[in-house]
Amino acid sequence: MTETVGAPSPKAKPDATPDNGHRLDEILERYSPEPSSLISVLEDLQEELRYLPREALERIATTLGVPRNQMYHVATFFKAFSLTPQGRHMVCVCRGTACHVKGADKIMNKVESELNVREGGTTEDGQFTVQSVRCLGCCALAPAVMIDRDVFGQVTPKQLRNILDQYPNGNRND
Amino acid sequence: MAIETIDTPRQLATVRSAARKVLLNGHPRISVGTATCGLATGAQKVLDALYACRAELQLGQSPIPISISETGCNGACFLEPLVDVVLPGQARITYGNVQPEDAAGLIEAACAGTVYGKRIIGRIDKEEFLVEGTSRNYRRGKLADEVKEVPRYAALPFFRDQVHLAMRNCGIIDPTSLDEYIAKGGYAAAAKALTEMTPDQVVDEVTRSGLRGRGGGGFPTGRKWATCRKAPGEPKFVICNADEGDPGAYMDRSVIEGDPHSVIEGMIIGSYAVGAHIGYIYVRQEYPLAVKRIRLALKQAEEAGLLGENIFCSGHSFTIRINRGAGAFVCGESTALMASLEGRVGEPRAKYIHTVEHGLWNMPSCLNNVETWNNVPVVIARGADWYASIGTQGSKGTKVFSLVGKANRVGLVEVPMGITLRQVVEDIGGGVPEGESLKAVQTGGPSGGCIPAELFDTPVDYESLTALGSMMGSGGMIVMDSRTCMVDVARYFLSFLKEESCGKCVPCREGTSRMLQILTRICEGKGRAGDIDLLHDIAQGMIDGSLCALGGSAPNPVLSTLKYFAEEYRAHIEERRCPAKVCRALITYSINPEVCTGCMLCLRACPVKAITGERKKPHIIDKLACTKCGLCADTCRSNAIEVA
Amino acid sequence: MLDGLQVEGRAGETVLSVARRRRVSIPTLCHHEAVSPSGACRLCVVEVFWGKRSKIVTSCIYTPYENDRIETNNDRVRSVRRFVLELLAARCPGVDQIRELALEYGVDMPRFEPDKDARNERCILCGLCVRVCDEVVGQHAIAFAGRGMERRVTSPFAEQAEECIGCAACVFVCPTGALHFEDVDGRRLMKELHTEVPMVACRECGLPYTSAKQIEKVKSRLRLSDEAAALCPPCRARAFGGRVERILAKDRKAAFPWEQSASFAFESAEALSGK
């Protein structure tokens, strides 16, 4: 079965709504109901809701014929998945080798101090989740930061405030 | 141009001529590099500005025959945003560091057939058709003087020694256009393989070419295919490993973003050779644009009949599915990747039983890296002998490297195997910035090692790099200068590996953690006598005892830095000193009162308020509060901040 | 060749199996005959030589080729085992089995600092519990979670696992005693799995000896009548004069392949029918 072409909408909806069941239906319809679809389904759901609600995981396990223990291991093994809600915007500071050598530590420090949150955490207002990623593949533009799907290269600590300010309550354009 | 189905080689040829006519239609063509790096430097704004300028110019008039399109990355990432302009009858001119303000000038110059005066990088005189071994000069008649003044690529130090096989189309064609791919000779190799060769002949050709796996293993590709072909069992699978987990490496991303059809074509040929009808492309989820590009290419290939039933009426059928990774470096390991495709966690298994015989769902599976698949059409189209004429005895062909870090010219470089590290780092990369000295280069990602500058006359090939204690790996080449602490580099890699260890086997799970503990202590100035021996012991235990290559090669960064930079370890342990002034616990920041102008910029920049002082009076850093983040030094305009 | 002696293995037989048949001792931790091999602990490693080359392999998985020469206890092999045991002793300083085995390999004091909570850590992540529950009992109630040093054994979502039937096969198969169960007020508490399973009492003597779910499971695999199922094994033996036990003995391999580590209820049944 060929996967439906075209990625799901990049604009993740901000809050979990009672609509989740319907969205999960849509996602499950994209893939054949077998264990090998597990990771694709989880990824699409993570992208939609910015986390994996427990009820959704249980339903996915049943629908795809995956035992719950396997589903739970997969959901907790991969860094892309979160069982707790994440911020509206994902701030991913690249910690690849080139970025490290060009001062990714400083960038992460500055992000943490600007947003008042530690790496891995979510800001109190639920706007930003800060993570490190290895790597974005923009090594020539080290140090790099990706917010949602926008990549910023050759970032200096000074620029960070401006970059973060581009993401107020809504999404930045594109 | 609507894509009709291409059912025979003859139809492919027809599409090719038509598409080539469009490509060489004598109109100015502008292409903007909009791969991930291009976009990150502002290429979208440049593209938008170009469209806008063109629209403005043609208000009320007939459409201006300037085509504007997007393209991938030609490797000169340090010059992005890059814009290429094909001046009909003249040449292809590359412009770098292009800004939106340049758009008007570029459009006008293209209309007039002249060279835009700013941002000039270089020129190419021919449109290459590498898979056919032919080329077509852009020049018709005399070359304008101003064009002659633009240096040829062959004269530019960055490009001079490069040979673009894998990157043959990157930065040249529009990756969203199947027509352009075909115009450059794409899918002709697949047609040749499926209609003029037997599967055994294909395997033989790939074997004789000497092509080796470009993902890091360097295993002879032909041999892998031969074993898979002979393996009993159906269905068989071909898999493309596009997980590219090595931090600092982005060759595969660029190939997929710049030339996705090349991977599909390679897999069609491979599937025919081994007898597989289903293929998987496993792309890292951290590459959203690459996922988008390959999905589109797949759709195009299917609609054109290049994938699916009875390709080229050869009787061979083949479809491809795309799966994304989910943030696990270990899934770059072939058995872990296959587990992940099966919907399980990415835990490797013992490879006493080879995946070519028992892989995905226990069936024969042929897994190769993106760059390997991309090279296959070249091998089939130009032949094994031609391919084997490039490179060295043991390492044929070219390799794409991501030359990054502290080099002056960073980007993707594709060079023939056998070129020396010095040529790559100094000639192509331009060495390190003024005031610093070249120290080492790190190759092979977290499984590789650091090679000191004294050994840079080593040729770049599989065996030579391994002999030095590093490895070719997927192609990451990170340049380090005197301000890089090699102990910190080892610690960095261990912290990466510790997070990425799947945790199944004891040596890797516990070993990476213990190694990291020791290295962290050393970097904090708490190193002890006996630490080095302990590191060696752990290293040997992990090499011998680990279940997979992640654990087995995890000690390499430590071992190679211990071998070549023992002095730095000694300084950290015995003197509590970091020679490169990187390890925060071992350095102090202070303000030189004689240089400080009292401007208060650093005061404001300090995130922990460790600096005090008044206007126009020298400031002071409170050493106890200081976190050594270095933000003050970045802000200071008078160079008053010293690190000791 | 096994340690210099010419041996023959059956088709597809592992080195470990051959070694055990030949009474050559190879230590294991994550291995058990009842479940598939894992190759996780690396303790059972041996060195295989062929031609001029050699490699370290886990004997629980590796099936030898003709002309392989295998050494089960040379310096390199012992070195790997010592390394594994040193790491495990540092991880779980409170587990005697590990400490004793480590001492045999010359590890007196691990050279690594134990973590704060290491005294209480008993799990070596061998996965035997997960595999027994998956492959033998078929309930899939136990989950691995996380990766690397975060890897742990738990129940899905660290909450009550409805799949658990309280058979305690996991407790019995655990090599380090990291899992426990406690029967309190007619409920079996599987502590580390955050799960409790209500037991049913023997109709005759009132001992809560099994859970309703477990009885259902056993009945689905054996021809066990309702009357027999309602009694605990000692009462059952008295009531049916050993007939049930003979049935159990015949179907035993199919129903209770984890024989050596069966729930205590079935252990007593075996004791009774052993005669």
Image (cartoon, helix red, strand yellow):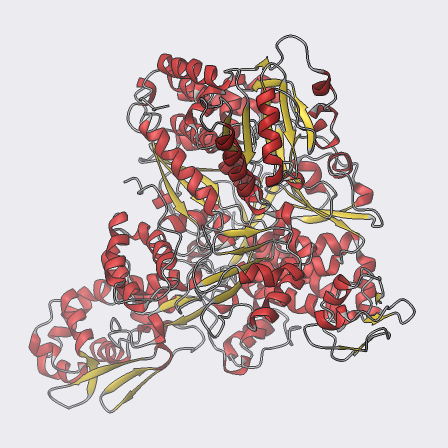
- C15 over B417 or under it: above or below: below
- B210 over C219 or under it: above or below: above
Q: Quadrant of residue B121?
A: top right
In the image, B28: left or right of A155?
left
Residue B567, given in percent of the width and then of the height, sits at: 83, 59
Nearest the viewer among B247 and C204 is B247
Residue C275, given in percent of the width and then of the height, sits at: 22, 78
Q: Residue at x 50, y 76 (%)?
A: C97
Name the residue at the top extreme: B141
Q: Quadrant of residue B356?
A: top left
In the image, C110: left or right of B509?
right
Q: Quadrant of residue C267?
A: bottom left
- C176 over C185 or under it: above or below: above
Q: Residue at x 55, y 62 (%)?
A: A164
Q: In the rendered image, is residue B353 in sight?
A: no
Residue C82, given in percent of the width and then of the height, sits at: 60, 66
In the image, B43: left or right of C111?
left
Q: Quadrant of the C terminus of chain B?
A: bottom right
Name the residue at the right extreme: B594
Q: Residue at x 76, y 56 (%)?
A: B484
Nearest the viewer among B22 and C111 is B22
